[in-house]
Image (cartoon, grey):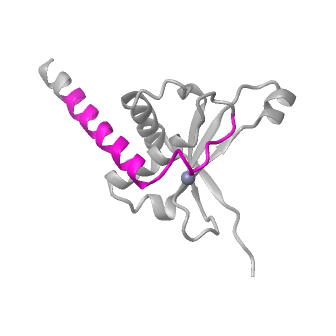
Amino acid sequence: MTTMPIEYFDAPDVKKLADEIADSLDLFHVVQQFVFCVRSRGSASRRTIARIHGFGRIWQETLNLPPSYVIEVISERYDRLTVEDREKTIIHELLHIPKGFSGGFRPHKGYIDHEIVESLHRTFKKQSASRKQVFNEC
Ligand SMILES: [Zn+2]
């Protein structure tokens, strides 16, 4: 049996959402310029919806490049989610980025759980609703 390699695609929709979330939730430590988003197809993992990859210190120092992150959404699952669940998924991934934007990760324990994500998602929805109002008045 042959396994097909994973394919990666640009994900401007995911990038736009991640930037909107980082803005709305005042995630000032997230250097948006160095958060990249890709959509993958053909991953063997059955349950993963999205994951975040960090460009760690050894790479930064060896290649002389800044810390950065890639949020990967698994097309087979992410693309079937509702808008709300997509937003929550990206909030979850952004929460893995530590305050120092080091290229490393924050763990789930103490930083990410269902309630934290739900509460931030409510804030995000409120913020985007009020932003829409501002635009409508213009
Ligand atoms: Zn996680």
Question: Can you say which quadrant of the picture contains the C terminus?
Answer: top left
Residue lying furthest top in this view? 138
The residue closer to the viewer here, 1 or 103, is 103
**Where is 137 relative to 50, above or below?**
above
Q: Residue furthest front?
A: 110
In the picture, the quarter occupied by the N terminus is bottom right
Residue at horizontal 83%, vertical 29%? Answer: 63
Q: Indicate yes or no whether the magenta region holds residue 111.
A: yes
| Residue 52 percent location from the top left of the image | 60, 47
Q: Height in image: 32 above or below 2?
A: above
* Left or right of 32 on screen, residue 6: right
In the rendered structure, the answer to whether residue 120 lies left or right of residue 138 reads right
The image position of residue 48, as x and y in percent, is: 55, 63
Q: Position of residue 4 (x, y in %)?
A: 69, 68
Q: Nearer the viewer, residue 56 or 77?
A: 56
- Give the magenta-colored segment's residue range: 103-132
> In the orientation shown, which residue stands out farthest toward the left?
137
Q: Is residue 47 visible?
A: yes
Residue 39 visible, this orientation: no
* Residue beneath the point at 56% across and 26% down: 31
x%, y% of residue 111?
52, 44
Residue at x 12% of width, y 20% of height:
137
Question: To which quarter of the image does residue 47 belong?
Answer: bottom right
